[in-house]
Amino acid sequence: MATITTSAIILELVPNPSEKEIIIETGPILIGSTDESQITLSDYDIAPEGVISIKGYEMSSTYGIVTTNAPITSIIGGVLTISSTGVSTIAKQIYRVVGTSL
């Protein structure tokens, strides 16, 4: 299983041999707090140099409005780190990661 520093939920959406897509859902964060998730890409058969896109979304409250966000991302040693700082109280964050397979 992936190394995750939050209680994130990770779902694999496109289990095919050439393209992989996972969705990462994190719990709530408070104003000024930073949330960070670390995912070992090879656990999901994504090549570290093959990440195509990472899109972020957040929901301001339970059943609230969903907006886009711009997470800070890096890939070091095959581990994807996604971090985001709350400018308001956020009920959940969702990240969509698309990449090529190993």
Image: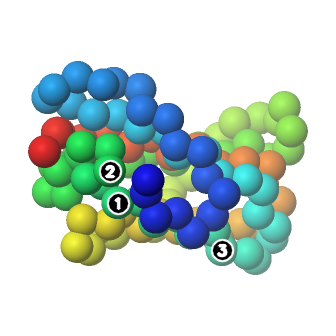
At label 3, the amino acid type is: Thr
User: Could you tell me if residue 88 is visible in this image?
Assistant: no
Q: Is residue 83 above or below residue 9?
A: below
Q: CA distance from mark 2 to mark 1?
A: 6 Å
Q: Residue 85 appears at what percent x and percent y?
A: 64, 70
> Which residue is tagged 3?
34
Tell me whether the residue at label 2 lies in contact with that at label 1, contact meaning CB atoms closer than 8 angstroms. Answer: yes
**Which structural element holds mark 2?**
helix
Disc 1 is placed on an element classified as strand
Foreground of the two, 30 or 81:
81
- In the image, residue 24 above or below residue 77: above
Which residue is disc 1 drawn over? 40
User: What is the C-alpha distance between the residues marked 1 and 3?
Assistant: 20 Å
Q: Nearer the viewer, mark 1 or mark 3?
A: 1
User: On the image, numbered disc 2 is attached to which residue?
Assistant: 43
Which is nearer the N-term, disc 2 or disc 3? 3
Q: Residue at x 23, y 23 (%)?
A: 16
Q: Residues within 10 Å of mark 2 (few under 14, many from 20)?
A: few
